Every structure is written in C-alpha cells, then in structure tokens.
Amino acid sequence: MPDVWYNAGRSLCTNGGKTMNDECLICGAPLEYLTSDERMECAVCGKAEKSKTRCQNGHYVCGECHTSGMDSLFALCLAETSADPVEILRKMMAMDFCHMHGPEHHVMVASALVTAYHNAGGEIDLADALAQAYSRGKEVPGGVCGFWGACGAGISAGIYVSIVTGSNPLAKEAWGLSNQMTARALARIGAHGGPRCCKRDSYLAVTEAVGFTKEKLGVEMDLGKVICVHSPLNNQCLKSACPFHPGKEE
C-alpha cells in the first residue's frame, strides 16, 4: 500500500511526498461512478462488497474504513456549549476522520443539529440523541445524492427532526415534520445543482434546519455567517456559484 496519511482539518492526503486534493483516499486520483454495482475489494481492510464508486486507478474504500474514527463525535458534542450548528459542524470537519467528501457527513449534520438544539434549550437526552444520529446516519451510504436523488446531508436533517420529535412510522405530527424537514433541505440543496459537495450540502441542510426548527418546534438556535474554507480542496467546487464561497453573500 502507498504511504498515505491525513492532514486533519484540511482533508489533504500525501502519497510519496506529493500533496493532493481529497479524491481517492489511497492515491488521490479522481473518483469515477459506475452505472451499475460491481464487486470491489476494500484497499484498506480487504472486505469485498458491491459498489458503484472507485477511483480511476481502481481503488475502493468501504464505508466503514472511510468513516473510521467517527465515534470521536460523541466527546466533541457532549462537551460542546454552542447553540450554533454551523460552528459545531466546522469543528467536526476539522477532525481526523472527516474528508472533503464522504458518508461521514450523513452523521455529522444530524449530530451538529441535535447538539445545537439541546444547547438552545431543546428538551432531549443529548447522549441518546447522538447515538441515534450516529446509528441512523451510518445507514445512509455514500453517493446517494446522485444515485438515489436524495443527498445524505438533507436526509440527515430529517433524521435530526425525527430524533428530537420522537418520530416513528406510526407517528402523526412528528412523522410529517421529519419528512417536511428532509424535503425542505433537499429542495434547497437541489436548487444549487451539482456536482455534489459534501461541505456545501451540509451547510445548506443545517442552515435550512435552523429556520425550520424555529418555525415548527419553537426552539431558536444560533446561526453565524457561513464562509467555506474548503474550496481549494474540492476539484468540483462551484466557486462563485456556491453561496458559501469566500467573499460571496447568499
């Protein structure tokens, strides 16, 4: 295996002394998305499974290996005092496990939101809420934004509302609210178009959830200005078309 390590907070990898944008976690090559599943072997743990995603050099990294270390979110969130989910999300994005893109964002959005909700006065058991955000978010695989037509960050916002309202398949109001939250997050994400950016889409989902939470649940979280610092690391960045690009007002 090539010499690979990760630079926390900047989502960079180094291979043989060369610094690259975060694409393939093994070699830095661009990813390719197939039209149908193929059997692939994880380059990290060796597990074989079907996937549509690999790099141009044939490397595949399974979801478990891609999100290794994500359990460190619990300590961060339980110690957090901020009621601003964007501030919390930024701290998560600076942690070792977080890459430029990946299914870890499907857990991070809900985790940042339940934490901010709790700190803003929302009456939930934060430890239990975080455990639910983790277990449910990890079930949403990478690439669903393009393959399912439902970005995992938007789904994660719906997971957040389902947790804080105690929703289940037989609930009435809570069931409706959680689906409304997902729909509103996805509509906002979809309005900006692709290609995907896990950072942009996470910010869009979280900021939409702040307004939804105040409107529907009566809990007012904080929300500072969102300025993305990840643009140089994203080969598909929309630049000035992104509402969070440096120097741009939404």
Image (tube, rainbow, N blue to C red):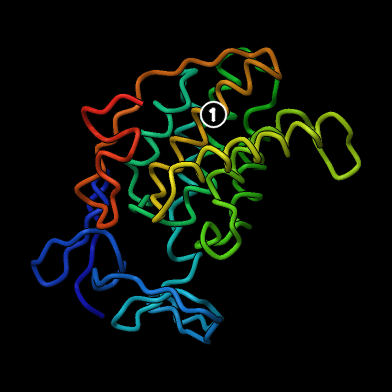
Percent x, y for residue 132?
67, 42
Q: Nearer the viewer, residue 101 or 182?
A: 182
Percent x, y for residue 211?
57, 20
When asked about the image quadrant of residue 76, the answer is top left
At a point 10% along the width and 66% down the height, the residue shown is 18
Quadrant location of the N terminus in the rendered image:
bottom left
Q: Is residue 30 above or below residue 205?
A: below
Quadrant location of the C terminus in the rendered image:
top left
Q: Is residue 29 above or below residue 74?
A: below
Q: Amino acid at mark 1?
A: Glu
| Residue to which mark 1 is pinned | 208
Judge the density around disc 1: few (<14), some (14-19), many (≥20) Cα neighbours within 10 Å: many
Q: Is residue 147 above or below residue 182?
A: below
Q: Is residue 55 left or right of residue 231?
A: right
Percent x, y for residue 224?
38, 18
Q: Is residue 242 above or below residue 65?
A: above
